[in-house]
Image (cartoon, rainbow, N blue to C red):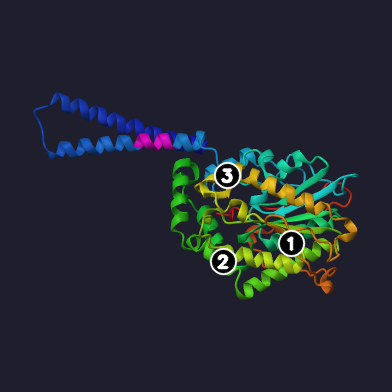
């Protein structure tokens, strides 16, 4: 109702400005002898007012009825409406069109992708166009699950998987889909910036809450001017230096240990920052550190940077305001990940903890030739700081065979 009133207000202003312009034009034609700067200024003002009102009505209609896409900030009405239209969850509260059971189906291999909005398909209208669904369609013999929520960092993913395993969720091949901003929860400054944006959204005025045009323009301008947003990628780069990087490595080790302590096997897929792709990609050193970390942990990994490096960002992202991978980027990833998983699943279950059981390096994927035997079966539990807006609620159901995970979706998607 309020949205209709907002649209009606724009139409009323258009009608009023158009009426005043018509009256002025009629008066001018009837009194052609009278000229002067005053009439010229008034006439130009009325013409400008009418054109602005016309543009406002057109913009309101466009963003309300025609514009159907997401942006990196979920505060905008258009992005929230995109979620209402396209974000359908299964019985486990994960975005998917199939339900997840606790037990692995007989005769199938289970692949569990754990990740954030990149994995969940932020900006992808049809879930069947996500890389995981494309792989599922090609390999019906694989049981593919996506334990992914927008806004998750490594700390959230670790706790999320712990909650699933506490329900006796069975794992086989676990794939951590890693994004370079998964260190975001290590920075209280970024959490404070998120809280400020949330508070600003909560106290917004009536027109900003109900007009699609005003709401969209306001938050795009606010995001561009926000100091924390401007330093977002600088924050993320700091996560791979000094104590921050040491803490992140401990959490990644804890994730590996959690998987292995429950009979699973971990592999990792790394996505680059799409907006920075090019010949001078400034986060190459971050990829190198991550690859070295996985090598030392004895975890198979696939770095997707070589796959995307020479492609223009605009061809890979959802839109200029949403840097998540689009359908084309997901299709490229699906082909590379499928080949990677074929190699990984060839490793027999009884060879999983054997350091000599390596996959021959192929393309961007590598497997470590060594593993620290003293930590192979040790479950190291990390205690990361989890910001309030991302506290997930893990529901337990001891009698149900269906995985039941409940969470609160972050109002801010980090992958900007």
Residue under circle 1?
Answer: 158
- Residue 83 belongs to the span the image colors magenta: no
Splitting the image into 4 quarters, where does residue 192 fall? Answer: bottom right
Q: Nearer the viewer, residue 167 or 340?
A: 340
Q: Quadrant of the C terminus?
A: bottom right
Q: Work out whether mark 3 precedes mark 2 in sequence or the reverse, and give the earlier one.
A: 3
Q: Work out whether mark 1 precedes mark 3 in sequence or the reverse, and give the earlier one.
A: 3
Q: Nearer the viewer, residue 198 or 313?
A: 313
What secondary structure is found at the residue carrying circle 1? helix
> Is 86 on the left or on the right of 404, as rendered?
left
Splitting the image into 4 quarters, where does residue 248 fall? Answer: bottom right
Splitting the image into 4 quarters, where does residue 195 fall? Answer: bottom right
What is the count of numbered marks? 3
Residue under circle 3?
Answer: 80
Q: CA distance from mark 1 to mark 3?
A: 27 Å
Is residue 134 among the parts visible in the rendering? yes
> Is 239 on the left or on the right of 164, as rendered?
left
Label 2: how many Cα within 10 Å (few below 14, some 14–19, many 20+): some
The numbered disc on residue 237 is: 2
Q: Nearer the viewer, residue 396 or 368?
A: 368
Q: CA distance from mark 3 to mark 2?
A: 29 Å
Query: Magenta residues, as a range?
Result: 53-59
- Labels 2 and 1 touching (C-beta < 8 A): no
x%, y% of residue 52?
A: 33, 38
């Amino acid at each position: 109702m309020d949205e209709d009133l907002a649209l009606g207000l724009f139409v009323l202003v258009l009608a009023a400005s158009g009426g005043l312009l018509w009256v002025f034009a009629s008066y001018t034609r009837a009194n052609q002898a009278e000229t002067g700067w005053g009439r010229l200024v008034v006439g130009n003002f009325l013409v400008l007012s009418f054109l602005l009102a016309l543009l406002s009505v057109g913009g309101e209609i466009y963003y309300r009825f025609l514009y159907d896409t997401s942006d990196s900030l979920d505060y905008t009405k258009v992005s929230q409406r995109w979620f209402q239209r396209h974000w359908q969850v299964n019985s486990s509260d994960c975005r998917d069109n199939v339900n997840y059971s606790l037990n692995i189906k007989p005769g199938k291999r289970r692949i569990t992708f754990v990740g954030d909005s990149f994995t969940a398909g932020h900006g992808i209208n049809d879930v069947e166009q996500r890389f995981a669904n494309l792989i599922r369609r090609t390999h019906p013999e694989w049981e593919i699950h996506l334990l992914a929520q927008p806004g998750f960092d490594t700390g959230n993913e670790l706790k999320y998987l712990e909650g699933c395993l506490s329900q006796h969720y069975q794992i086989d091949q676990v794939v951590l889909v890693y994004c370079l901003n998964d260190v975001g929860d290590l920075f209280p400054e970024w959490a404070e910036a998120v809280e400020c944006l949330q508070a600003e959204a909560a106290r917004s005025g009536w027109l900003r809450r109900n007009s699609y045009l005003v709401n969209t323009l306001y938050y795009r301008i606010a995001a561009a001017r926000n100091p924390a947003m401007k330093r977002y990628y600088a924050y993320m780069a700091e996560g791979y230096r000094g104590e921050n990087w040491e803490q992140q490595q401990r959490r990644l080790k804890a994730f590996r240990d959690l998987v292995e302590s429950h009979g699973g096997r971990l592999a990792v897929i790394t996505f680059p920052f799409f907006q920075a792709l090019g010949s001078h990609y400034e986060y190459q050193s971050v990829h190198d550190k991550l690859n070295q970390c996985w090598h030392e942990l004895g975890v198979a990994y696939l770095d997707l940077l070589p796959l995307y490096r020479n492609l223009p960002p605009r061809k890979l992202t959802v839109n200029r305001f949403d840097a998540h991978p689009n359908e084309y980027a997901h299709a490229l990833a699906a082909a590379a990940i499928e080949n990677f998983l074929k190699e990984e699943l060839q490793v027999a279950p009884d060879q999983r903890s054997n350091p000599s059981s390596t996959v021959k390096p192929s393309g961007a994927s590598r497997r470590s030739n060594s593993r620290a035997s003293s930590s192979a079966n040790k479950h190291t539990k990390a205690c990361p700081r989890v910001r309030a807006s991302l506290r997930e609620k893990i529901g337990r159901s001891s009698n149900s065979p269906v995985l039941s995970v409940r969470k609160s979706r972050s109002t801010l998607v980090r992958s900007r």
